[in-house]
Amino acid sequence: MTDVYIVSDNIVSSLGFTTDENMDLLRLGQTGIKQHHDDRISPAPFWASMVNSEILARRFADISDPPRYTYFEQMVIVSLRQAMVQAELDLTTDRTLLILSTTKGNIDVLNPNLAGEKGIERAYLWQTAQLLQYFFGFRLKPMVVSNACISGVLALIIGSRLIRAGEFDHVVIAGADIVSEFVLSGFNSFMSLCTGPCKPFDKERQGLSLGEAAGTIVLSNDKELANKKDKVVVGPGFSSNDANHISGPSRTGEGLYIAIKRTLQQTTQKVDYISAHGTATPYNDEMESIAISRAGLQDVPVNSLKGYWGHTLGAAGVIEAIAAVHSMYGNVLIKTVGYNTMGVTHPINIIDKNRETKINTCLKIASGFGGCNASVLLYKK
């Protein structure tokens, strides 16, 4: 079977504009979730993890003309450019594919006051992906993966499968979403937002925190492009749908359990670490604890990074997978910031403080609206 290597990556978030900047602050336990006042998004103050727009504008100005591109597009382009410079890929061949993972993309341009000359047509996800294709010179038509909050993990699974099938040599995955009026009002209508940084798996958790980010992962079948001493491979992965409810997960964790079980059936690797979805909502955290326990992984160290970045929707699976890979490079488990007291009925091994240990494998899991679930194994080789 063809191995699929992680060649390079980048994270643009509230914690920084490179993966190293983000990882440094994760290790320090610093959250990017703050209270914001922005009338374009909400008439009332709100808590979220948001990218520094002034720094983003300066960084993008070094690349291209900011007024021609939306805020969302600028975030993605800055992230993509850095990851691809590191990878040194030839994008002009028909052996390289771009995948855009997002739930809402340029949703804010549906507001005529924000669309300007760009037009509301930029809200079509395929148009955004095509714009990125032309900007960077990808030869092939890009793919869009938009399946709620599992989009990033699902994009990893799809990208690695396409390489293993011999369709492509390289796949570039960009995951991104922004905090917008549409997204904020939507989660407000569910009464699921926390007034402060969220607390995944904690007894006192009150709901999720929203976030925005852009993350890029470059996959390749070329081992020599993976320039880390410990090369990380994207292993087996599966997705499922429990069809339980339009927004609520199965109370038994059935869908996520199936995705985890089918992933582990395809490998002999022992799981050293689980990067959970961990949204800090009562139903998600409880469901994840049930699924993890049912899979016999209750003793495996598990964390959620939502307390640092908030829930970044289509970017979440990408940036959290990047953090997991760099945790493996450094052999350090990052604590679940916001967690203090166990708040789920099925005991799982929540990482409550940073600790150094050998990490050879990571199981990245995710769940989302509509009952979708995904699981993928990452391992050193």
Image (spheres, grey):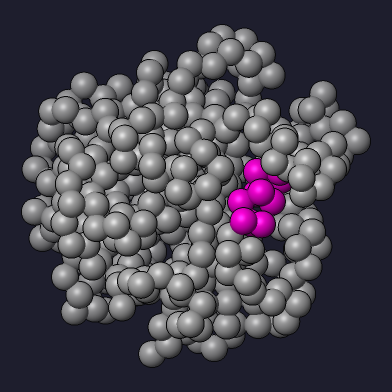
**Front-lying residue, 233 or 131:** 233
Examine the rendering and report whether any part of residue 149 can be seen. no
Residue at the far top in the pictured view: 44
Q: Residue at x 18, y 38 (%)?
A: 353
The quarter of the rendered structure image containing the N terminus is: bottom left
Drawn side of residue 354 relative to residue 4, left or right: left
Magenta highlight on residue 231: no
- SS majority, magenta: helix
Residue 23 position (above or below residue 58)? below
Drawn side of residue 260 relative to residue 149, left or right: left
Q: Residue at x 54, y 30 (%)?
A: 50
Residue 57 position (above or below residue 359)? above
**Front-lying residue, 327 or 168:** 327
Q: Residue at x 58, y 64 (%)?
A: 86
Segment tinted magenta in the rendering: 73-82
> In the figure, residue 361 lies in which quadrant?
bottom left
